[in-house]
Image: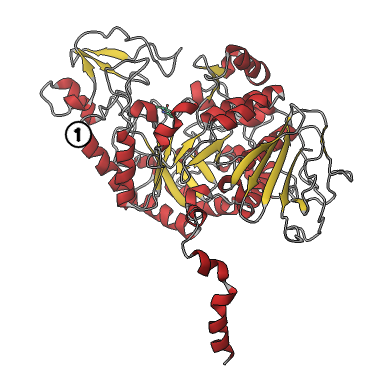
């Protein structure tokens, strides 16, 4: 009887569902996994070796899945793992369907993907199709024989083009974009190094091959792709090196094809472009790439970290605000390349160099810095504040392996290899990366960032470690999906050093404050009139920062705080200690 009554009454108890009928657009957005993900980028060959040959492999990575799952990451982005002469650390692929034999077999990869899925972790891989290795059989055939069908897979010129020495991506190291090949008797085009000839993506035969490549990896269980060098992939060859025509439908077409193969597969673009170009890559209505790295904000974020001034960072955030509803920014602090500061003014770039990369040896390609974050910031309070901010930015956070423990760099290694040293698991030989005498790349053994000092095992046992801090931030971020999915706003802090972001969801607003200055700052009246504002515990400590009756917040140097405003309820904070009616930051950069 009670059940019958309940069934009859239920529709009356749920008037909103009845009344609206249709799901709200936000309901659909909430299902987009890439919007609520936490991405972790790693290179299998330097992560964990399982067979003692000195090279990391899929079986080693599989063994470390529990660690990654405990850290809380939900998406792994794998650097290229296909066969390669490794002249560009694997970004020079010589077989798009294979796996570098040192890293394992296809069965190992499948097993890894399966085990990752069991833990709710998705796997995304690099898709490097702007170019091949010059040792790829396609290029070898193309250069040897004019009649080869592969000839038109690349971009050739009989004469040396006028802009042959313009548009280099690696200035200082790379000297031309058109190089003469004596076997071919012609010049070939390469945006990147000479050993990376550009594929002619305009050619339908190349497009058909790309479809095969994508289909191959999706069938093996891959959840999506980080598309390498997007603006160069879509450039129409031969139009102009400095200002090429771009064929955006290639992206729309790729997205459609990928989605046709696997409905929820992701296309994440490496797209370092000016804000006004973003729409063309995302697509007017989100029909392009679902996600792109926000390189623009990244550069101004480093400027803010270097100078303590958040004004230009705020402008950069506003400049990249406009994205289609289903699209999303990927935010990061450091990635596997140099920090590209090419969009800063000369004066701004000099300011970042002066603070974070003063030696010539730390700088690269006339525009960037080849260092890891921990040594660059050096101040642990600033480092923690920076990571808190990463998880507070209105997009999906992307962490680079080793960042979570504050790994350092080895500036003796060439170019970007300085920041690609093996993962540091423990204090023992080779930092636990391998038992081999000759690791593929030397783990960091000297200085303050040596594996004896900086490693996972030690930090896991330490509740005050950077690893613990980042694990907490990830958990926090998952608890507050308003960040990344809600509607965000910058709030005025009246201090040039404090960034305040508010993200509004249907039920509450999450507000974060970050002090970029080494000196204490007071934020006045932030929660004036906002009933039910409260601090969220970040650092696990009770004892919130002082806040006076007017709702002012006192932030220590490099301090930060996360708050919620839940207007209608009388909330109980996650730590169970109600501070209703007050706003209290508990995460402080000390
Ligand atoms: C972009 C990658 O991030 C970088 O590491 C690589 O060298 C170039 N693409 C060339 O593939």
Q: How is the image coloured?
A: secondary structure
Q: Is residue 509 visible?
A: yes
Residue at (17, 24) in percent of width and height: 151
Residue at 76% across, 58% down: 575
Q: Is residue 145 above or below residue 542?
A: above
Quarter of the view holding residue 201: top left
**Does residue 208 appear to the left or right of 370 in the view shown?**
left
In the picture, which quadrant includes the C terminus? top right
Q: In the picture provided, is 506 more to the left or to the right than 385? A: left
Drawn side of residue 219 relative to residue 226, left or right: left
Q: Position of residue 529 (x, y in %)?
A: 79, 47
Q: Residue 40 placed where, x, y %?
A: 53, 43
Q: How many marks?
A: 1
Nearer the observer, 49 or 334: 334
**Does the beta carbon at disc 1 come under 8 Å from ligand 1?**
no
**Nearer to me, 368 or 276:** 276
Pointer 1: what residue?
204
Q: Quadrant of residue 507?
A: bottom right
On the rendered image, what quadrant is the N terminus found in? bottom right
Q: Percent position (x, y) of residue 230?
A: 38, 30
Q: Quadrant of residue 170?
A: top left
Residue at 67 percent of width and 25 percent of height: 311
Q: Would residue 447 be visible to someone looking at this image? A: no
Local crowd at mark 1 within 10 Å, few (<14), some, or many (≥20)?
A: few
Residue furthest to the left in view is 147
The secondary structure type at the circle numbered 1 is helix
Q: Is residue 502 above or below residue 273?
A: below
């Amino acid at each position: 009887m009670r059940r019958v009554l309940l069934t009859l009454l239920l529709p009356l108890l749920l008037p909103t569902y009845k009344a609206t009928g249709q799901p709200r657009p936000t309901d659909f957005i909430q299902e987009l996994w890439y919007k609520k993900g936490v991405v972790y980028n790693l290179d299998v060959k330097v992560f964990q070796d399982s067979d003692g040959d000195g090279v990391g492999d899929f079986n080693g990575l599989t063994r470390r899945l529990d660690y990654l799952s405990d850290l809380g990451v939900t998406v792994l982005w794998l650097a290229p793992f296909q066969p390669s002469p490794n002249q560009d650390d694997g970004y020079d692929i010589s077989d798009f369907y294979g796996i570098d034999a040192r890293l394992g077999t296809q069965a190992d990869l499948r097993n890894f993907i399966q085990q990752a899925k069991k833990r709710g972790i998705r796997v995304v891989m690099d898709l490097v199709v702007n170019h091949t290795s010059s040792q790829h059989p396609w290029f070898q055939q193309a250069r040897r024989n004019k009649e080869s069908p592969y000839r038109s897979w690349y971009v050739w010129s009989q004469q040396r083009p006028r802009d042959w020495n313009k548009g280099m991506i690696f200035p200082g190291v790379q000297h031309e974009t058109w190089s003469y090949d004596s076997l071919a008797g012609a010049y070939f085009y390469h945006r990147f190094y000479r050993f990376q000839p550009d594929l002619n993506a305009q050619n339908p035969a190349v497009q058909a091959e790309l479809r095969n490549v994508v289909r191959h990896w999706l069938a093996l269980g891959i959840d999506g792709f980080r598309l390498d060098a997007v603006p160069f992939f879509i450039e129409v060859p031969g139009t102009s090196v400095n200002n090429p025509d771009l064929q955006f439908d290639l992206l729309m077409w790729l997205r459609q094809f990928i989605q046709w193969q696997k409905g929820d597969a992701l296309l994440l673009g490496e797209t370092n472009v000016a804000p006004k170009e973003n729409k063309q890559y995302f697509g007017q209505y989100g029909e392009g790439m679902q996600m792109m790295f926000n390189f623009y904000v990244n550069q101004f974020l480093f400027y803010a970290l270097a100078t303590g001034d958040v004004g230009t960072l705020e402008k950069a955030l506003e400049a990249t605000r406009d994205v289609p509803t289903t699209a999303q920014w990927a935010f990061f602090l450091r990635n596997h390349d140099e920090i590209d500061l090419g969009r800063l003014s000369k004066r701004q770039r000099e300011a970042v160099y002066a603070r974070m990369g003063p030696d010539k040896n730390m700088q690269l390609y006339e525009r960037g810095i080849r260092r890891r974050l921990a040594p660059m910031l050096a101040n642990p309070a600033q480092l923690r504040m920076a990571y808190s901010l990463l998880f507070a930015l209105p997009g999906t956070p992307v962490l680079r392996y080793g960042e979570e423990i504050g790994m350092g760099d080895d500036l003796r290694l060439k170019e970007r290899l300085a920041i690609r040293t093996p993962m540091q698991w423990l204090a023992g030989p080779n930092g636990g990366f391998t038992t081999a005498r000759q690791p593929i790349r030397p783990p960091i053994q000297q200085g303050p960032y040596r594996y004896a000092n900086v490693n996972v095992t030690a930090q896991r046992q330490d509740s005050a470690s950077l690893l613990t801090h980042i694990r907490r931030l990830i958990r926090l971020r998952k608890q507050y999906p308003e960040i990344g999915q809600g509607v965000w706003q910058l709030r005025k802090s009246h201090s040039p050093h404090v960034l305040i972001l508010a993200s509004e969801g249907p039920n509450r607003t999450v507000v974060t404050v970050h002090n970029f200055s080494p000196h204490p700052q007071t934020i006045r009246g932030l929660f004036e009139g906002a009933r039910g504002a409260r601090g969220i515990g970040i650092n696990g400590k009770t004892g919130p920062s002082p806040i006076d009756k007017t709702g002012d917040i006192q932030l220590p140097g490099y301090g930060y705080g996360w708050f919620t405003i839940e207007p209608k309820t009388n909330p109980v904070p996650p730590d169970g200690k109600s501070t209703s009616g007050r706003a209290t930051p508990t995460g402080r950069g000390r």
